[in-house]
């Protein structure tokens, strides 16, 4: 029986340890700031919807900008991106503190500052999440993701209580100033971190092409689509507790800023317990069982919170909700990371965050509107019903298991020697691959080709088609396009070890005496007098076609 990996195993790696520790201080400041913003809104606005929108202003930028940030994370130095994000958040937080000290904050101005801090988070998160694979080996990746969640929730267990105390004693402005200072340790740790930079043999993808490639990869990956959908539903419903907790503290249990912070601390304490139990739970239950149990457990907690008017009963309901929160979101995160090759992991994580935080932003607005019209207790009950429906969705869209896919590059492709003098941007390129298939093998061939089509399009091919020769039905031709020659090379470099089995099956079905012949052609819509791609080493006029 394999030895169970310690949940603390990633701490063996010095870089992870240093950055994780520095992140604690940053998370503490962020949580203190969140308490200050949430409670300040209850004092400067009479609208329950405006209070709930504080959470929405934090999560909305992640929904809007995560994909762009993911494209940056996959194509530029992740450390530099994180440094820029941290500096932006530090400057905005300092500005928020100055406005609060001056006493000129309005509800919409507070939301604007909160939104810009969320923009920094949106820029930082994909690079930070994608860096887990750079900081620890694959076998420690689930533990690193859980510890990453624990870092936030460890501070959530004490940070909100500290934040509530600071707000009660010194005011929200002091909480905002403390947040501005809290970014300094992480900035210092990032400056000291010297990650290994992979050698790039191809130019960076264009920004628009990188975003398109990320969207295409997710669209052609059914398991990742399931994670995104379930993440959206969970974020939509589960954010109800965090969005409405200021109202629960103020109206349900007649508390103040410290009560609100203490209740958030209970949520964080539960989340720490969930992070510590993560590895053991994954060993005992399937991914889908864990997710369904977490959806249902969170639903029970939300409903209990809606009826409770006792602070201690409410806190007891909040603790398991925190555990369900971290179990679900960390499982989604690990599933995305282990189901995605390194070349697109930043964009895949960004799209996951877009879906999940998009659900949270939508939920913050939705539950605020429901609370304004029907009361916070009704909003919580409706959120509980949505969570139950989210568990039932698993009957149709079950979460995949991690599996043992090897997503390392296949490295079978060798760039052919070309007689035409192509430039990297030359194109479009049309590729045709000839197969000879016996009639008895046609069903197996078509099944394999359906998978091949998905992989081709996922990795960048366009206009894929499968042709059969009318005069010689044994001949089948796979055809597809790529925009440029460099995109053709990039397309093949994206192939993973997990794709090798399909290529081997197709070769086994091929009955030709030689390997399937590959035709690589450059398209020309018109025939110029002088060919713009002359033969290599030939500078004279070319023959007319």
Image (cartoon, grey):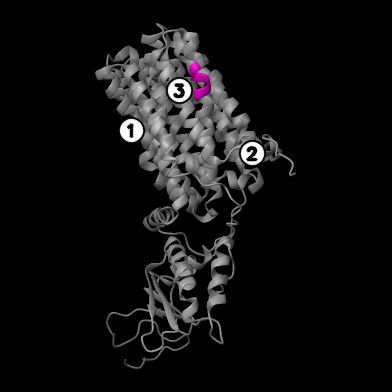
Quadrant for residue 503, please give it.
Answer: bottom right
Labels 3 and 2 touching (C-beta < 8 A): no
Secondary structure that dominates the magenta span:
helix
Q: Which mark is first along the chain, 2 or 1?
A: 2
The answer to which of 100 and 329 lies nearer the viewer is: 329
Q: Which residues are magenta?
A: 317-321
Indicate the quadrant containing the C terminus: top left, top right, bottom left or bottom right: bottom left
Residue 320: within the magenta? yes
| Residue furthest bottom in the image | 543
Is 73 inside the magenta-drawn segment?
no
Q: Secondary structure at mark 2?
A: helix
Question: In this rendering, does residue 170 appear at all?
Answer: no
- Secondary element type, mark 1: helix
Q: What residue does disc 1 label?
A: 362
Choose mark 1 or mark 2, whichever is in front.
2
The quadrant of the image that shows the N terminus is top right
Residue tagged by mark 3? 300
Q: Which residue is mark 2?
A: 283
**Residue 370 located left or right of residue 423:** left
Please state the horizontal and vertical placement of residue 306, each as a whole percent of the image.
Answer: 39, 16
Residue 64's x, y, as percent? 35, 41
Q: Secondary structure at mark 3?
A: helix
Mark-to-mark CA distance, 3 and 2: 24 Å
Crowding near the residue tagged with mark 3, few <14, some 14–19, many ≥20 C-alpha atoms within 10 Å: some
Q: Residue at x 38, y 10 (%)?
A: 252
């Amino acid at each position: 029986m394999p030895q169970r990996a310690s949940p603390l195993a990633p701490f063996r790696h010095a870089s992870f340890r240093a950055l994780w520790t520095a992140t604690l201080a940053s998370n503490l400041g962020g949580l203190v700031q969140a308490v200050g913003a949430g409670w300040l809104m209850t004092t400067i606005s009479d609208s329950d919807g405006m209070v709930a929108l504080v959470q929405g202003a934090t999560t909305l930028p992640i929904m809007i900008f995560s994909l762009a940030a993911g494209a940056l994370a996959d194509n530029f130095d992740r450390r530099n991106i994180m440094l820029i994000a941290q500096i932006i958040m530090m400057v905005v937080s300092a500005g928020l503190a100055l406005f609060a000290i001056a006493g000129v904050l309005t509800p919409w101005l507070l939301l604007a500052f909160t939104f810009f801090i969320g923009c920094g988070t949106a820029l930082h998160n994909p690079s930070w999440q994608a860096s887990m694979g750079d900081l620890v080996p694959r076998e420690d990746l689930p533990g690193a993701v859980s510890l990453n969640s624990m870092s936030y929730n460890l501070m959530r267990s004490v940070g909100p209580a500290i934040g509530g105390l600071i707000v009660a004693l010194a005011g929200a402005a002091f909480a905002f100033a403390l947040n501005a200072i809290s970014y300094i340790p992480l900035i210092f740790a990032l400056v000291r971190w010297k990650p290994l930079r992979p050698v790039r043999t191809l130019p960076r993808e264009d920004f628009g092409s990188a975003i398109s490639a990320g969207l295409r990869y997710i669209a052609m990956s059914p398991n990742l689509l399931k994670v995104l959908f379930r993440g959206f539903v969970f974020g939509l419903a589960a954010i109800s507790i965090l969005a409405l907790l200021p109202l629960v503290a103020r109206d349900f249990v007649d508390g103040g800023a410290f009560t609100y912070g203490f209740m958030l601390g209970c949520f964080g304490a539960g989340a720490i317990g969930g992070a510590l139990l993560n590895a053991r739970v994954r060993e005992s239950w399937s991914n889908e069982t864990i997710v369904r149990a977490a959806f249902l457990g969170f639903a029970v907690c939300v409903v209990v919170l809606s009826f409770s008017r006792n602070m201690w009963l409410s806190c007891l309901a909040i603790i398991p909700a925190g555990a369900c929160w971290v179990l679900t979101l960390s499982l989604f995160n690990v599933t995305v990371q282990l189901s995605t090759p390194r070349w697109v992991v930043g964009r895949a994580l960004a799209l996951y965050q877009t879906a999940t935080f998009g659900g949270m932003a939508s939920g913050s607005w939705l539950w605020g509107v429901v609370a304004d019209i029907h009361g916070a207790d009704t909003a919580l009950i409706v959120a509980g019903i949505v969570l139950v429906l989210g568990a039932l969705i698993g009957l149709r869209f079950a979460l995949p298991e991690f599996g043992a896919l090897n997503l390392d590059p296949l490295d079978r492709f060798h760039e052919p020697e070309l007689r035409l003098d192509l430039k990297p941007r030359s194109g479009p390129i049309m590729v045709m691959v000839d197969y000879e298939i016996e009639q008895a093998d046609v069903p197996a061939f078509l099944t394999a080709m359906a998978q091949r089509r998905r992989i081709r399009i996922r990795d960048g091919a366009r206009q894929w088609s499968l042709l059969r020769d009318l005069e010689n039905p044994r001949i089948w031709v796979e055809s597809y396009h790529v925009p440029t020659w460099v995109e053709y090379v990039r397309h093949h470099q994206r192939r993973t070890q997990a794709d090798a089995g399909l290529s081997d099956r197709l070769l086994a079905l091929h009955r030709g005496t030689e390997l399937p012949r590959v035709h690589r052609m450059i398209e020309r819509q018109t025939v110029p007098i002088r060919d713009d791609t002359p033969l290599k080493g030939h500078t004279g006029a070319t023959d007319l076609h």
